[in-house]
Image: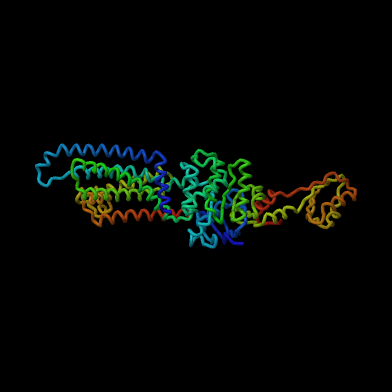
Amino acid sequence: MTTLIEAEHLHRYYGKHCAVHDVSFTLEKGEVLGFLGPNGAGKTTTMQMLCGNLAPSAGQIKINGFDLLDRPKAAKRSLGYLPDTPPLYRDLSVQEFLHYCAQLHGIPRSSIKPAIAKAKERCGLNDVADRLITNLSKGFQQRVGIAQAILHNPDVIILDEPTVGLDPIQIREIRTLIRELGQDHGVILSTHILTEVQESCSHVQIIHQGRLILKETIAGLNRQMNTGTLRASTRLPPDLDALMSLPGVTSIETVTERQIRIHHSTNDHTAERIAETIVASGWGLQELTPIKRSMEDIFITLTQEPKQIDL
Amino acid sequence: MILAIAAREFKTLFSSPMAWTILAILQFILAFLFLSQVETFTMLQPKLAAIEGAPGLTDIIVTPLFGNAAIILLLVTPLLTMRLICEERRNKTLSLLLSAPVSNSDIIIGKYLGTLGLLLLIILLTALMPLSLLAGGELDFGKLFANILALLLLVSAFAATGLFVSCLAGHPTVAALGTFGLLLVLWVLDWTMGMDDQRSELFEYLSLLRHFQNIQTGLVSSLDISYFLLFISTFILLSIRRLDNDRLQR
């Protein structure tokens, strides 16, 4: 594993307002890191700092081992960035634009053509290569933006909300592309769409009010999400103590007298045992529904009460 | 890298009607002025022949032509430079340059050279007019080159000022107006010279016009040249500083 990005204690103030507060993280090769957060959480600010568009008020960023402040050119060489608004020169054609980007990134003259061809191929731009960017639809413009970011085959690819404005088929294509890129690059993408993170990322990082409140692998997150909840309705009021004594049951809340919510772990067939107990006790089981805790729930609990992470 | 940015800038000017319009209009106006100057010369010619050491063809045609070109370029340069950084910032394309492995000085100098390319073309086209006189007369080449040099230094200074104001302004129109205002002030600064009691040597030194005219007369002195070089490098440095400041904003 090679560490591609090391960000340490990043702070960023706008006047007195603190947009990013003490954010530290690393990105390894082969990781797709999803930056998740509501609007104004500091996602874009963090990304701008990573790409050298904004100087951090405090903290250090190293890209591929090069400090972004001391050796900006070397650090930026291994960086591909798609800002939230794709930086496109509208009076150029796609081909001309990509050619210019290739020159800016210092791709040797002889390998410019194959690099452009590959980027066009990957982003599905072959049919529009000779059209002016201004005449393209928003989805295609977004794709040109992505093409620009991956053109020079950078080690680190940073995409700020890459699927905005794309139709569902294009979104699927882009997600596949991102997963593919994640295999031999490090990718950071920001989004506020949770399924996007679940589908294309290997790691997730939730940022809220400028603070990092969760860093997990997707697998770990899914595991956490599967601490299950059952909703049970019975004809007679159930004996809560009897249910509580079952192994695996963590807590019970009563909704009404005859409806309860049982929180339990998904290990060793707890649900089965709960069902058996209710039936055996003859409370008259009427409903037993598993409530899956979605990522939305986690997101909402985390962002609304950042102090109590009780996952 | 600088050259890539400069080439892009130059081509962008020509991909919109901007450069073509400016070139066409300038050429038309200057050709008209040139023609009227030639006319004056043919009228004066019999009289001049009688005078010992009279001003020649170059003095009567070339110097006024380049003087007029300078004033017209004072109006035109702000229009060329207004978009340079300002529009990149408005269209959010600046982040493309900022996250690419190019330094801020590369960006500024590249942009500057790109604009200078078009201005150079304008000067070249202007210089072709007096050269056409070679068909039927003789020119004082020393003086012609002094004029070309003067105009070149002058528009380079204009462009550097425009670039800096474009870094400051939030809107291209504001950049154009700002540049024009600043240049005009620097241009007319030595008009106080006429009034003897109010003469200010500082103003006289600062005035663009004064240094321009010095070189135009054929007196290529290091004082005037270094004035222009200082002027240009000051504004370019300020532009780079200003762009650096963008990262630190607020």
Residue A176 vs B41, above or below: the answer is below
Q: Nearer the viewer, residue B219 or A241?
A: B219
Q: Quadrant of the C terminus of chain A?
A: bottom right
Residue A223 vs A138, above or below: the answer is below
User: Is residue A263 found left or right of A142 in the rendered image?
Assistant: right
Q: Quadrant of the N terminus of chain A?
A: bottom right
User: Is residue B127 found left or right of A235 in the rendered image?
Assistant: left
Could you tell me which residue is drawn at 37 percent across and 54 percent down?
B236
Query: Is residue B250 visible to the viewer in this orientation of the structure?
Result: no
Question: Residue A163 appears at what percent x and percent y?
Answer: 59, 45
| Count of all numbered marks drawn on residues in the image | 0
Query: Is residue B109 visible to the viewer in this orientation of the structure?
Result: yes
Question: Residue A298 appears at what percent x and percent y?
Answer: 69, 51
Question: Residue B153 appears at what percent x and percent y?
Answer: 29, 51
Q: Nearer the viewer, residue B68 or B235?
A: B68
Applied colour scheme: rainbow
Please tell me in which quadrant of the rendered image residue B22 appears: top left
Question: Residue A208 appears at what percent x and percent y?
Answer: 61, 53
Q: Nearer the viewer, residue A103 or A117?
A: A117
Q: Nearer the viewer, residue A136 or A271?
A: A136
